[in-house]
Amino acid sequence: MGSLRFGRDLIQLEEAQERVLRTVRVQPAEQVRLEEAMGRRLAVEVSADHSVPHFRRAGVDGYAVRAEDTASATGGAAVSLEVLETIPCGTVPTQRLAPGQASRIMTGAVVPEGADAVVMVEMTDRQELAGKEAGLVVEIRKAMAPGENITAVGQECGEGEKLLAAGTVIGPGEAAVLATFGYSMVPVFVRPRVAIFSTGAELLPVEETLAPGRIRNSNSYMLACQVRESGGEPSIMPILPDEVEQVQAELLAALSWADIVITTGGVSVGDKDVLVELFERWDGELHFNKIAMRPGSPTSFGQWRGKPIFALSGNPGASYVGFELLVRPYLRKALGAVDPLPQTGTAFLDAEYRKGSAYPRYVRGTSRVEAGQVKVRPAGRDKSSIMISIKDADCLICVPAGGRGAEQGELVRTISLQQH
Ligand SMILES: Nc1nc2c(c(=O)[nH]1)N[C@H]1C(S)=C(S)[C@@H](COP(=O)(O)OP(=O)(O)OC[C@H]3O[C@@H](n4cnc5c(N)ncnc54)[C@H](O)[C@@H]3O)O[C@H]1N2
Ligand code: MOO
Ligand SMILES: [Mg+2]
């Protein structure tokens, strides 16, 4: 039995997170088409290289006028103005308004010089005059205030304004900004390639028929989803047996192309806990192999050939939580996030949690808002070996170390899940 198996140094989760984040190298950038940039993280800061809007923009279909010309207009006593021209969207007005003049204008078109308001067409009547006074006249039935129905230059944003920080996840609003400023190609961080290995002689590939003592490999698929959600490119690798030679060879092979390796299982104190065996004989660097947390206390992390290896516990609950607390922050930082650690909040515990523990516990929780208060309860049976309740969790409930657990109604700290 090697020394790592029992003689492990216990560290706090915060220390483990720090050790993980210290090793992160930010990913290189690549250019992708704007329509393919959704969900990616921006690799550059984006500033406005022009004001928005960059011309005075009509906000309604109607008539551009001089507000002072309309001062006396009411429903009963309209003001008549001479119509100079029609200004459709995408064109530039050719004439400046003088007193007594108006121009027909469409929503989104350039407001002509001289005009300082746009009257909705519903507040006007048109007249075609004949004879000596031939021409088009518009009757305005509403007094306008200067600036009414006009979006001023730079009202949305001024030239030079910083709009998107590097590391921002590109969603609908960001895509609209990028399009506005001409980014047909967008510099984004390259997705880290993540090799996912599950270890254990009991594991069956998903397509196999159940057999006595065997279970299907669920961790790899769960983790692949977590990797994808975090912006990584997962590869589900073949199941590894509890044979250290083979595990060593397969992980080394993966390190030649993957940016990150994740394993599950084989990190505890069982006879066949093969990752422990590997860490005893490899030429890599082990940064920790025991964290004061439940689930996932034997979670281990090291670097081999300069690449990070996360060895998560095999128990599905521990694997899931280990990823959220350690791997997701790594991926987020590698993709330029400035705040890689999960967001925390508080909520009222809606059920008692009587399970005390020597280590802080991260209990899968389901939260809801009731009468303006966030309430949270355990998502189901919360044992690290239980897989079924993972799907119901939207947060982790932090239960401090100690023999007491937590009371119903107590304000508890929570960690949000499923962020990018
Ligand atoms: N004597 C002790 N026994 C255990 C301790 C301990 O401190 N002393 N720690 C327990 C804790 S805590 C955990 S967590 C587990 C960690 O176990 P391993 O990481 O070594 O994982 P395995 O032994 O390989 O498997 C544990 C469990 O999970 C199932 N499993 C594994 N891989 C998968 C997969 N890909 N998909 C679905 N399920 C998987 C496996 O069949 C086992 O049931 O050790 C405790 N024991
Ligand atoms: O890693 Mo274990 O989950 O602490 O039960
Ligand atoms: Mg084990």
Image (cartoon, rainbow, N blue to C red):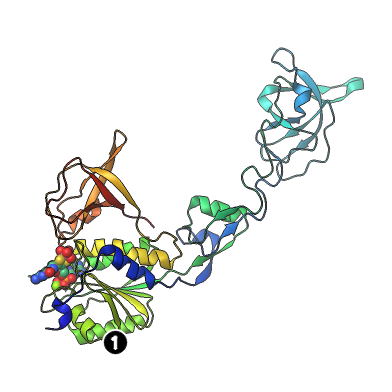
Read off the residue under disc 1: 283
Q: Is residue 123 visible?
A: yes
Of residue 283 and residue 75, the one placed in the foreground of this image is 283
Of residue 290 and residue 327, the one placed in the foreground of this image is 290
Which quarter shows the C terminus? bottom left
- In the rendered view, does 196 fall on the left or right side of 63? left
Of residue 358 and residue 110, the one placed in the foreground of this image is 358
Please tell me in which quarter of the rendered image ligand 1 is found.
bottom left
| Quadrant of res 19 | bottom left
- In the rendered view, does 381 fall on the left or right side of 142? left
Q: Is residue 394 visible?
A: no
| Quadrant of res 229 | bottom left
- In the rendered view, does 214 fall on the left or right side of 377? left
Q: 10 Å neighbourhood of mark 1: few (<14), some, or many (≥20)?
A: few
Indicate whether 352 appears above or below 140.
below
Q: Position of residue 4 (x, y in %)?
A: 18, 79
